Image: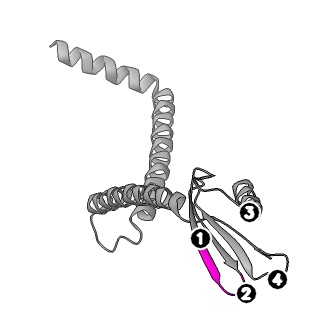
Amino acid sequence: MASSDFYTIVKNYLQAHVGDVLLALIFVFLLTLIVFVLSNVKLASAARRHYQLMRGVDGKNLEQMLENNLSEVMEIKRDLSLLKDKVKELERQGKLSIKKIKFKRYNAFFDMGGDLSFSLVLLNEYNTGVMITSIYARDENRIYLKPIVNGNASYTLSPEEREILDEALRG
């Protein structure tokens, strides 16, 4: 019997306040409509981002594409590491190659003309290499090869040889 009393109380309240109840229902309906519209706007935005993300995929699984890209990045990292090692080796070898070249033509004897004698120095980055000197005379031509280590010759140098060695060391 208590439940019939409850229904009677609710019925009497609704009859007495029908305008207020309708106003409350309209407010709830409008609030629900606003939430629905905002949800649809957010859903459309998410759908647009999803479409942009999947555009050009050609039916492939996005996870598979990411895995493929990751493996390509790892392969590129390995290749880059190998290239760095190669560059270091080339730099090391480059320091040993001939980089400084100087030569001078001159008359070794005062009675000779034409500057037919010469000295040539070939040095690497460590100032190590060789000096080649050709002394021309009327009856003969002599060629001398002198090693240069760290910018120093172990043999006596002529003034012309000393001059081009100093130029090569400065250059």
- Precedes in sequence: disc 2 or disc 4: 4
Report the disc number at residue 164.
3
Q: Secondary structure at mark 2?
A: loop
Residue with the mark numbered 4: 112
Tag count: 4
Q: Residues within 10 Å of mark 1 (few under 14, many from 20)?
A: few
Q: Residues within 10 Å of mark 2 (few under 14, many from 20)?
A: few
Q: Residue at x 68, y 87 (%)?
A: 139
Amino acid marked by disc 2:
Arg
Comparing 12 with 152, the one in front is 152
Do callouts 2 and 4 mark residues in contact (Cβ within 8 Å)? Answer: yes
Amino acid marked by disc 1:
Tyr
Amino acid marked by disc 4:
Met
Q: Is residue 151 above or below residue 8?
A: below
Residue with the mark numbered 2: 138
- Which of the two discs, 3 and 2, sits closer to the camera? 2
- Direction from residue 45 to residue 2 in the image, left or right: left
- Precedes in sequence: disc 1 or disc 4: 4
* Magenta highlight on residue 116: no
Q: Secondary structure at mark 4?
A: loop
